[in-house]
Image: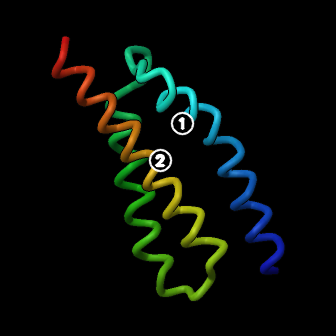
Amino acid sequence: MDKVGYFAGALTLIAYLPQASKTIRTRKTRDLSLVTYLVLTVSALLRTIYDLGSQKPAIYLTNGVVTILSLIILSLKISHIKNT
């Protein structure tokens, strides 16, 4: 079952990385929803905290990375809003 968890985590990151990479590289967030990234960031953070008790690195490491990437995108989005 651990292999399934690692595979699911890898797919989550593969799906998320292109948007995160493009946003971090270009710093363009105009077309991204603030509400979506706010909810995604809080959700990933809460899942990471909750999953730490599971002792399953495949789950909490994936959610931890998604939390970090979401925080970066969210901060870029908020910065973009402040500068417009």
Side of 8 where 77 appears, left or right:
left
Q: Decide: is 81 above or below 10.
A: above
Side of 14 where 75 appears, left or right:
left
Q: Secondary structure at mark 2?
A: helix
Q: How is the image coloured?
A: rainbow
Circle 1 residue: 20
Q: Decide: is 84 above or below 56.
A: above
How many marks overall? 2
Circle 2 residue: 69
Q: Confirm or deny contact between disc 1 and disc 2 (CB under 8 A).
A: yes
Mark 1 to mark 2 CA distance (whole Å): 6 Å
Side of 73 where 75 appears, left or right:
left
Which amino acid type corresponds to the residue marked 2 in the rendered image?
Leu
Label located before the other in sequence (1 or 2) = 1
Side of 71 where 17 appears, left or right:
right
Q: Residue at x 46, y 66 (%)?
A: 47
| Quadrant in which residue 54 is drawn | bottom right
Graded by Cα atoms within 10 Å as few (under 14), some (14 to 19) or many (20 or more), the crowding at tag 1 reads some
Q: Decide: is 51 above or below 77.
A: below
| Quadrant in which residue 78 is drawn | top left
Q: Residue at x 38, y 42 (%)?
A: 72
Which amino acid type corresponds to the residue marked 1 in the rendered image?
Ala
